[in-house]
Amino acid sequence: MRSFPVLILSAACLVSCAEETALPVFGEPVWDGEHLQVWATEDARICGGSLQALDHHAQQVSDHVAQLGVRSTPERYRYYWISDEENESHDPCPKFGRACFLGITIYATHYSSHEVVHSEFASKHSSFVDEGLAVMLGDFDTSETLDTTAIPDIIDETQGESLPNEYYRPAGKFIGAMRELYPEEYLAPLLQTQGKRIKN
């Protein structure tokens, strides 16, 4: 395995994408885990221990949803860790920034536990639900105050379409509140929601 410079990675915009038919391949395989295989470009900046931490996070997500009767992705998925330059040149996630999830493939310029949640189970439902779950189980920062009166309008406005970035945190906070109130029952009804494919 190649060595990569150890750097502190900054927080980034974390989003999921619609599925596409032709998916680009980046770099070479550099690490195999239980849940994911990591491919990386030569100039990707990866902190030491990040690959193991991503796989461990995937296992924790899988264990959590299994306790609630939900099966996560059975096959390993690819995590393409690419440089900012590669991302700017090839734009694997058009209109979505520096990280996305396509099918069973993640493209990211950084450590993205948010996209791991999408890969494990939180995709193809209502985007409000999927992004809320990915924020709650992947981003770990839902500390801001939630205006609950806005939630029905947000859900009504998006209607399963791609959720705008400004609604990610409210969605995560809302689903986190559901988990607090109904820890054993919160997940199943959320996963019965239907998503709509994003039109490019």
Image: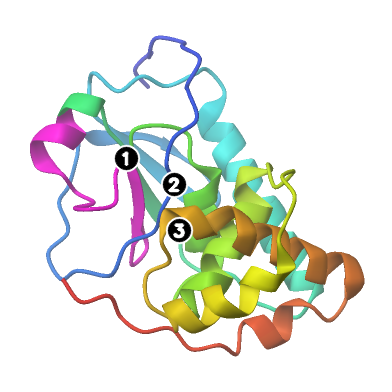
- What element does badge 2 sit on? loop
Residue range in magenta is: 86-107
Image height of 87 relative to 2, above or below: below
Image height of 138 relative to 154, above or below: above
CA separation, marks 2 and 3? 21 Å
Q: Position of residue 133 (x, y in %)?
A: 62, 63
State which tag comes first along the sequence, 3 or 1.
Answer: 3
Determine contact: label 2, label 3, CB under 8 Å: no
Q: Amino acid at mark 3?
A: Arg
Q: Amino acid at mark 1?
A: Arg
Q: Residue at x 43, y 83 (%)?
A: 195
Q: Residue at x 45, y 58 (%)?
A: 76
Q: Which residue is mark 1?
A: 98
Magenta stretch containing residue 61, yes or no?
no
Mark 1 residue crowding within 10 angstroms, few (<14) / some (14–19) / many (20+): many
**Looking at the image, which is closer to me, 69 or 137?**
137
Identify the disc placed on residue 36: none
State which tag comes first along the sequence, 1 or 2.
Answer: 2
Q: Which residue is mark 2?
A: 14
Determine contact: label 3, label 1, CB under 8 Å: no
Asked whether residue 136 is in view, the answer is yes
The number of numbered badges drawn on the structure is 3
Image height of 187 relative to 12, above or below: below
Q: Which residue is mark 3?
A: 76
Q: Position of residue 102 (x, y in %)?
A: 31, 62
Q: Quadrant of the C terminus?
A: bottom left
